[in-house]
Amino acid sequence: MAEVLVYVDHVDGAVRKPTLELLTLARRIGEPVAVHLGPNAEEAAKVLGEYGAVKVLAADVPEFAEYLVAPKVDALQAAYKAVTPAAVLVPSSAEGKEIAARLAVRIGSGIITDAVDVEAGDEGPVATQSVFAASFTTKSRITEGTPVITVKPNSAAPEAAPAAGTVEQLEVTVADASKGTKIVSRTPRESTGRPDLTEAAIVVSGGRGVNGAENFPVIEALADSLGAAVGASRAAVDAGWYPHTNQVGQTGKSVSPQLYIAAGISGAIQHRAGMQTSKTIVAINKDAEAPIFDLVDYGVVGDLFDVVPALTEEVKTRKG
C-alpha cells in the first residue's frame, strides 16, 4: 500500500488533535508516515503510532526554532524524497498552509487548501472543500504531481488504529536560502483555559446583539459551562468588545466545530463564511428574520440576555 506523509502539529512533542484527524484520513488512502519536526519525537511517536502511523520520520535541528517556516519545508521535502508518498497531508493552520504551499512549489505539485474531507479516488485522493463563502461544496483532485492537501481542524473524528510508530531519524540539510527570516523574540500567548478557537469541538460566539464588552461574560459563562471556545463576529470585534484573535469569519478565523452557538449574530455572509461548515448550528436572536436562521439546525427567537443565562444554568444543572 502507498505511503502518505502526515505533517505533525505539536507543542514540544505534545501532539495536537488535528494531526490525529489527519492520520485517520490518511488511512483511507494509504499507510500514514508521520513527519515530526522538533523535540520529544520518541514521546510523540507513542500517540502517533496509536492512531495509525506506521513510522515516524523525526528531525530536530536548531534552525526549526531560529528561523520562520522555510527550514521545516526543507525537512518535509527531505521526507518526501525519502518516502515518495501518494499524498502529503498538512493541518490547515496559518503555518501549515504556508509550509504546504512552499512544498508544492518545490516538488512541482498541485495543492488543495482547507479541505473538510479526504477520500480515496480511482485517480488519486479526492478532497472536499466548502467554497465561495461556504455557498458551495466541491470535490477536487490534483492532476499534477503528488497531491499536497491541507485539512481544516474538526474535519474528521480521530480513530485509534494501533501501528508500529517506529521512529526513524530524518537527515535534514537546511539551505542558506531558508535562513532569510530570523526569529528575534517570542512572547507566550496568555492562556484563557479555553480550547483553541480553530480546534474546539464547541464554539460559542457573540455579535452585535451582545451590546458591549461588559456583556461578553454572558457568552463566556455559557462557553465555560460547555468546555467551549469563545468567538466573536466582526461587528463585535470592530467595536472593541472582544479581541481580533477571536473573530470568526472571512477576515477572521474559520471554524468547523461539532457545535456552533451564535448569540446576537445576524448572520452576514462574512460571518457565515467562517462557520458554515460547523456540524450543528444553533442561533439565538431577537429578530426572527435574521439571515442566520437560514442555515441553523436549531433557532431560538428571543433575547440572548434571557436565553443564554438560562441555557448556562441548565447545562450546569445537567452536568452537576
Image (tube, rainbow, N blue to C red):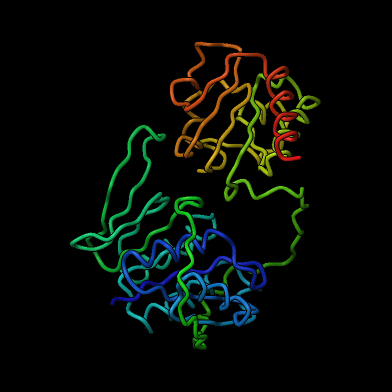
Residue 8 in the image: x percent, y percent? 53, 69
Task: Name the quadrant of the N terminus.
Answer: bottom left
Q: Is residue 224 above or below residue 123?
A: above
Name the quadrant containing residue 213. Answer: top right
Residue 147 in the image: x percent, y percent? 31, 64
The answer to whether 25 appears left or right of 198 in the picture is left
Residue at x 50%, y 23% (from the top left corner): 268
Q: Is residue 105 visible?
A: no
Residue 204 in the image: x percent, y percent? 63, 35
Depth check: 163 or 48 in front?
Answer: 163
Q: Is residue 293 visible?
A: yes
Depth check: 309 or 262 in front?
Answer: 309
Residue at x 26%, y 56% (from the top left corner): 141
The answer to whether 260 appears left or right of 228 in the picture is left
Residue at x 41%, y 68% (from the top left corner): 103
Task: Name the quadrant of the C terminus.
Answer: top right
Residue at x 37%, y 52% (from the top left corner): 117
